[in-house]
Image: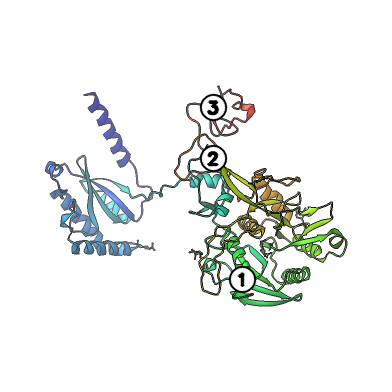
Amino acid sequence: MKNFYILSILVIFLINSVFSNKIENNDEGFYMIYIRDPSEENHNKKRQEISDNVEATINEIHNLIVGNFNTYKNVTVLEEMEEESNLRKRDDSENTEIDYGESPFIYPIANVNDKTILYSYLTGDLVDTIREFPDVLGFEKDFVYQAEAHYSYNRVLKHTGWSDLLVRKETPFHLSSISQGEYSSKFVEEYDTSYYYPVTAGTDVDVFIFDQDFNFNHPNFSNTNREARCLLSVDKSKVTEINSKICGNKDSSVNHGSKVAAVIAGTTDGVAKKANIYGINFKEFTAANEVAALQYIKKKYLRANKAIFNFSYGGYKYSSQVEGEYSSEQEIINSLAQVGAVFVASAGNDGTLVNDVKNDLYHLPSQFNNVISVGGVNSETSSNIQYIYRAKLSNYGNGIDIFAPFDFSIAYRTMDDKTNMRSNPSGTSYSSAIVSGVAALFMGENIGKTFNTSIMLKNYLQKYGQENRVQNITYDTPGLFVNNGKLIVYSMNGVYNGCGIHAGESKCSDNKCCSILGYCQKYGTSSCKIDNGCQTLYGTCTK
Ligand SMILES: *C1O[C@H](CO)[C@@H](O)[C@H](O)[C@H]1NC(C)=O
Ligand SMILES: *[C@@H]1O[C@H](CO)[C@@H](O)[C@H](O)[C@H]1NC(C)=O
Ligand SMILES: *[C@@H]1O[C@H](CO)[C@@H](O)[C@H](O)[C@H]1NC(C)=O
Ligand SMILES: *[C@@H]1O[C@H](CO)[C@@H](O)[C@H](O)[C@H]1NC(C)=O
Ligand SMILES: *[C@@H]1O[C@H](CO)[C@@H](O)[C@H](O)[C@H]1NC(C)=O
C-alpha cells in the first residue's frame, strides 16, 4: 500500500511537469502530442496498434496539416517526412513492433499510462488549434540533446573567456599540450588528446612567414575564409611581389615553409586555422634580405595590431657586430613593433646558450629586442606525470622567453609527388611556429586592442602560459611553457581523482577540502587550511 502511494505521487508529479509546461517557444517545430487513450486491449497486445479514438484524432490532425501546408515556414520538413514514409512502405514495414498508421505527417511513437504519444511537425497556430481537441492532453516540443562530451563547454568558456569554443579531436602532442595544464594520472585517468581553441582561430590576423619553399595547395590550407599564399620573394635584397600558391623550390623534399605554415595555421595540425598566412620566400637567409622584406611589408602590407612575424632561422654573432647604431635589423624591427607588430623567432638548435655573455656571442634574430625567443621541449611520462623538459638540441639561457613543443608527429601524406611533406619535422623553428599560432589566437580574440611584442609577451603569453613547467633548464632560463589560455585538464573517459583544475574541475564530496595541490582532504590537515591554499571553488573550506 505504501509503495502504491509513492508511485501515484510520482506519476502525478510527472504528468504535472509535462502538462503544466506552457510551450515557451510557441513556433514551428517537432512536437510530441499527448492523447488520452485508455484502451485496455492495446496494452496487452504484442504489437502496438492504433486504437479507434486515437485514429480519429490522427486523421483530424492530418487533415489540418494538409489543409495548412501554405502556412508552414519550412515545407521541406513535411516533404522529407512523406519521402521517408514512402521508403518505409516499400521496405514492407509490417514487421515492426509499432503501427505508425497511414499518415506520414503524424504518427504514434509510444503508449504510456493510458496515453498515446503522437509525433508531428506543427506550426504554432496548429498547436493552438489542436490544443482544443477533447482528447489532447498536452504538448511537448522536441528537444535536441547535446552529444555527451568529456569536457564542459560552458566551463571552458567561463575559464578562458573565449567568444566561443572549438574542439579538435585526437590531435598530436603539439596541440593537445598547449590547451591544457599539467597532466598527471594521479588526477586524470586518461590523457585528453583534444585541442581546444577559440572559434575566432586567428581570424583577421596576418602571419608573415619568412622561410623557404611553400606550397599552399596542400588541402590543409584549403579553407577559403582566409588568405594562404605566397606574397613576396626576396633575392639580393630586392623584393618581388608574387601571388601564387607555390613558391621556392617546387621539388623540395624539405618544404620547410609549408610545414611551418601548417603548424601555425593548417586546418588539421595548425594552432590558428583561420589566420591569414603569407609566405615570404627567401633565396637566402641574410640580414639584408630580412631588412628589405620588413621594409616592404611595412610600406605596403602591415596592418597595425594584426601582424605577426615568425622568424625561424638564426645564427650567432658577436655583440660588436650587433649593437650600436648600425644594426639595421634591430632598427626596423623596432619601427614595426612601434606600429603594432609582434615578432617571434626560434632560439636555435645548437644546444647552447642563446646569449653567451662570456664569449660575447648572441643568437640572432631571436636575441634582438622586440623579438620573442622560443625554445623547444619534449615530454616524457614517468611515475604517471607528464614531464616537459628542454629538448637536448634546443638552445637555452635567460634570453629565452618561452618554450613550445620541439618534435612533431605530423605525418603528411604527399598531396602530389612534388611536395613531399611526409617527414616528421623537429626543431625550434616549429616551436616558434606554435608560439606564432598562439599569438594569432590571442590577437584574433582581441581585435581592436593594441599589440606589440612586449604586450604579447607580458599580457598574454606570460599571463596564460605555465610558469616553471619546463624541466632540465639552467642558466636562469625561464621555465615558461606556452598555453593558449585553457588550463583545465580533462580525462577522456571522465574518471578523476582529486579536485580542481588538474582534475577536470571536480569538486570534493563529503564536505572535504580541496587542497592547494588538488587532493580532497579533511579540513584542517596541514595542506588544507584556508590560509594554506584550500580551494573554495572545489571544496569546503570550513570545519
Ligand atoms: C617561423 O619559424 C620557423 C621555425 O623557427 C622557421 O622555420 C620559419 O622560417 C619562420 N618563419 C618566418 C616567417 O620567420
Ligand atoms: C528546412 O528544413 C530542411 C530539412 O530539415 C533543412 O535542411 C532546411 O535547412 C530548413 N530550411 C530553413 C530555412 O530552415
Ligand atoms: C608596446 O606597447 C607598450 C604599451 O603601450 C609600450 O609601452 C611600448 O613602448 C611599446 N613597444 C614598442 C616597441 O613600441
Ligand atoms: C591535412 O593533412 C593531413 C595529412 O596530409 C590529412 O590527413 C588531412 O586530411 C588534411 N586535412 C584537411 C582538412 O584536408
Ligand atoms: C636532464 O638533464 C640531465 C643532466 O644534464 C640529463 O642527464 C638528462 O638526460 C636530462 N633529461 C632529459 C629528459 O633530457
Amino acid type, callout 2: Asn
Query: Does 46 appear above or below 318?
Result: above
Lower sequence index among marks 3 and 1:
1
Which residue is located at x 75 percent, y 50 percent? 397
> Residue, x 66% and y 60% (percent of image)?
429
CA distance for labels 3 and 1: 55 Å
Q: Quadrant of residue 114?
A: top left
Q: Earlier in the sequence, mark 2 or mark 1?
A: 1
The residue at which mark 1 appears reads as 214
Q: Which mark is residue 384?
A: 2
Q: Nearer the viewer, residue 7 or 529?
A: 529
- From the image, tell me which residue sits under label 3: 521
Percent of width and height locating residue 154: 50, 45
Q: Secondary structure at mark 1?
A: strand
Q: Position of residue 138 (x, y in %)?
A: 27, 45
Q: Residue 144 placed where, x, y %?
A: 37, 51
Side (left or right) of 503 relative to 464: left
Gap between marks 2 and 3, in whole Å? 21 Å
Image quadrant, ligand 2: bottom left
The quarter in which the N terminus is drawn is top left
- Whether 148 is drawn above or below 365: the answer is above
N-term mark: 2 or 3: 2
Which residue is at 25% across, 30% downward? 7
